Image (tube, grey):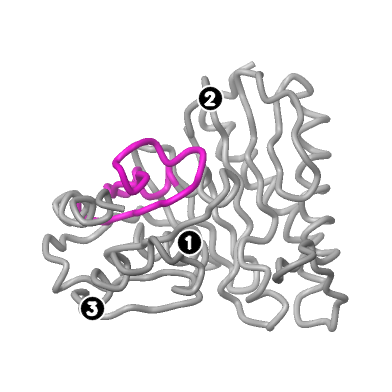
Amino acid sequence: MTIAMPDLAAFFDELADAAASAIMPHFRAGLTVENKLSAGFDPVTAADREGESAIRRIIHSRFPGHGILGEEHGDHQLDADNVWVLDPIDGTRAFIAGLPTWGTLIGLCQGGSPSHGMMVQPYVGERFYGDGKSAFLATRSGKSSISTRACARLEDALMCTTDPYLFTPEERPVYERIERSARNTRYGTDCYGYAMLAAGHVDLVIESGLNAYDIVALIPIVEGAGGAVTTWTGGSAKDGGRIVASGDKRLHEAVLAQLSQV
């Protein structure tokens, strides 16, 4: 069953409301942090688990034939025509530090391709939504369309990445060459870097080691705002991995020429 617009946008808002109600009581509230890794650090909290559970309950109730791919509670019916891709808190490290640079990612794949996505930041009251053709930002004061900005040259670009130490030894030299050429680089942005790119404040995001739930919701937002999101070799970003997003497709091609060498 395919959801029709405008009902789909309202349904995303319903899911966002449920996630925010489950997550926000834990933010800056001294919650317990668990580590999902035996070596390294991959934090998870009750807020992550309860946020995803809240979204999943509504989807299961309203659309039992839909599939779900979620970070915290596993996969369900991934062969369905409609598959929801969920990351209740993208940026859990920021969340546990009390920083507002995290977001809830809600994505929908239809026929195997990302079709709609929302990034929700309930603490500051922002919702970024896109369908691959257009993109919008809703705040407490209203809703407006957003678009990427022109930036053809890397030397003029403002770039974001979550953490340069997440790149492998093989990936890091090419990333560092690009960073040295960019005008400015900001770290620790997680999903917010992509949202700021779609809104025309950032020109380039380069990351590696992403999962599908880290990127699917963001693809329709960036593309709807006029940008490009691909792997480092120019392929589909829907399965995660090495990801690059650009607000200007001329910049995207220039950066891909360097990233594709890895």
Tell me if 24 is positioned left or right of 94 in this view.
right
Q: Mark 3 = which residue?
A: 180
Q: Nearer the viewer, residue 186 or 224?
A: 186
Residue 244 within the magenta-colored segment of the rendering:
yes
The number of numbered discs placed on residues in the rendered structure image is 3
| Residues at marks 1 and 2 touching, judged by CB atoms closer than 8 Å | no
Q: Position of residue 236 (x, y in %)?
A: 39, 36
Sequence-earlier tag: 1 or 2: 2
For disc 2, the marked residue is 110
| Amino acid at dot 2 | Gln
Residue 158 or residue 168, whichever sits in front = 168
The mark nearer the N terminus, 1 or 3, is: 1
Does 171 sit above or below residue 78? below
Q: Residue at x 23, y 51 (%)?
A: 256
What crowding class fits label 1: few (fewer than 14 Cα within 10 Å), some (14-19), or many (20 or more)? Answer: few
Question: Is 146 placed left or right of 31 in the picture?
Answer: left
How far across and down, in percent of the image, does residue 260 sit? 26, 49
Which image quarter holds the N terminus?
A: top right
Please give left or right for residue 175 compared with residue 101 in the image.
left
Q: From this view, report whether residue 192 is shown above or below residue 127.
A: below
Residue at image point 81% right, 66% down: 45
Mark 1–mark 2 Cα distance, whole angstroms, equals 28 Å
Magenta span of residues: 219-248
Mark 2, Cα crowd under 10 Å, few <14 / some 14-19 / many 20+, is some
According to the picture, the residue beneath numbered tag 1 turns out to be 142
Q: Which mark is residue 68?
A: none
Classify residue 173 by image quadrant: bottom left
